[in-house]
Image: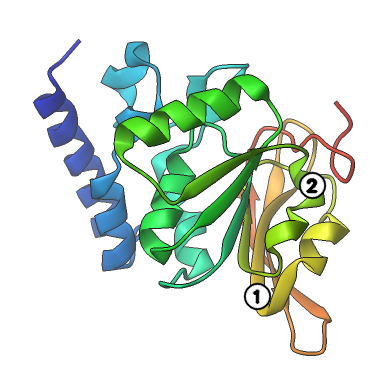
């Protein structure tokens, strides 16, 4: 295994490449990526590969997304300090850490797999992230106690947009969610909630995520 200094150098090169290629477009997202490198959120046996722009395994048969995919979603989310954000699908905790750095306030993230709830909490603790709340449960139902949200970001593929998530958006809020097949291909949808409560949907093209399991998603 390489040294942590070398891991850091490799990660910085990955971030700078994504920035040059305009996948990371904003200085805020670039700084968040540099503050929380992906190797802090994977098991040590994968540290040598954390800089590679591909998904990696995490416990319970799930994956941590490729850096470019995380960057694309964060840039589309247009996160600003003070926004209230719900993430559905905590996984490793990496995306939640990046969101928390961008909004500078409490972030709520839901994970249905108990092993990943603990994995994410450990990772976030080691990384020094204090404003992320990892909630065990069915993310397709959202998290009503803290609704409404400025942004909801879903990191798993659904058969359709879950109604509870749209209901828990503020007027003017935005939902990002992959929608499509169970384990092959989805479209990344941006759902905007208009002031009158109606929605407008934009399609940002093909992506591939693990399935979103729950009452308003795929049945496990």
Q: Residue furthest bottom?
A: 196
Residue 92 position in % (x across, y down): 49, 31
Residue behind mark 2: 140
Residue 188 position in % (x across, y down): 65, 55
Quarter location, residue 204: bottom right
**Which of 45/203 is in front?**
45
Q: Earlier in the sequence, mark 1 or mark 2?
A: 2
Snapshot colouring = rainbow
Residue shown at 40% from the left, 72% from the top: 81
**Disc 2 element:** helix
Residue shown at 46% from the left, 68% from the top: 79
Residue shown at 30% from the left, 54% from the top: 32
Above or below, comparing residue 84 to residue 23 in the picture? below
Residue 152 position in % (x across, y down): 64, 60
Residue behind mark 1: 173
Above or below, comparing residue 190 to residue 101 in the picture? below
Drawn side of residue 139 relative to residue 118, left or right:
right
């Amino acid at each position: 295994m390489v040294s942590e200094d070398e891991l850091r150098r490799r990660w910085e090169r990955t971030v700078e490449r994504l920035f040059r290629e305009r996948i990371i477009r904003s200085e805020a997202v670039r700084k968040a990526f540099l503050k929380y490198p992906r190797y802090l959120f994977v098991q040590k046996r994968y540290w040598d590969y954390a800089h590679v722009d591909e998904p990696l395994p995490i416990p319970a048969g799930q994956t941590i997304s490729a850096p470019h995919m995380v960057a694309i979603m964060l840039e589309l989310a247009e996160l600003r300090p003070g926004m209230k954000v719900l993430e559905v699908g905590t996984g490793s905790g990496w995306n939640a850490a990046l969101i928390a750095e961008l909004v500078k306030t409490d972030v709520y993230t839901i994970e249905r797999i108990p092993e990943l709830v603990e994995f994410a909490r450990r990772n976030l603790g080691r990384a020094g992230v204090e404003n992320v709340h990892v909630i065990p449960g069915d993310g397709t139902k959202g998290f009503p106690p803290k609704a409404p949200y400025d942004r909801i970001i879903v990191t798993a593929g659904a058969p359709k947009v879950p109604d509870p998530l749209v209901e828990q958006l503020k007027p003017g809020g935005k939902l990002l969610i992959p929608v499509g097949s169970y384990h092959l291909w989805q479209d990344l949808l941006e759902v905007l909630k208009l002031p009158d409560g109606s929605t407008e949907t934009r399609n940002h093209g093909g992506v591939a995520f693990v399935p979103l399991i729950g009452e308003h998603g795929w049945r496990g």
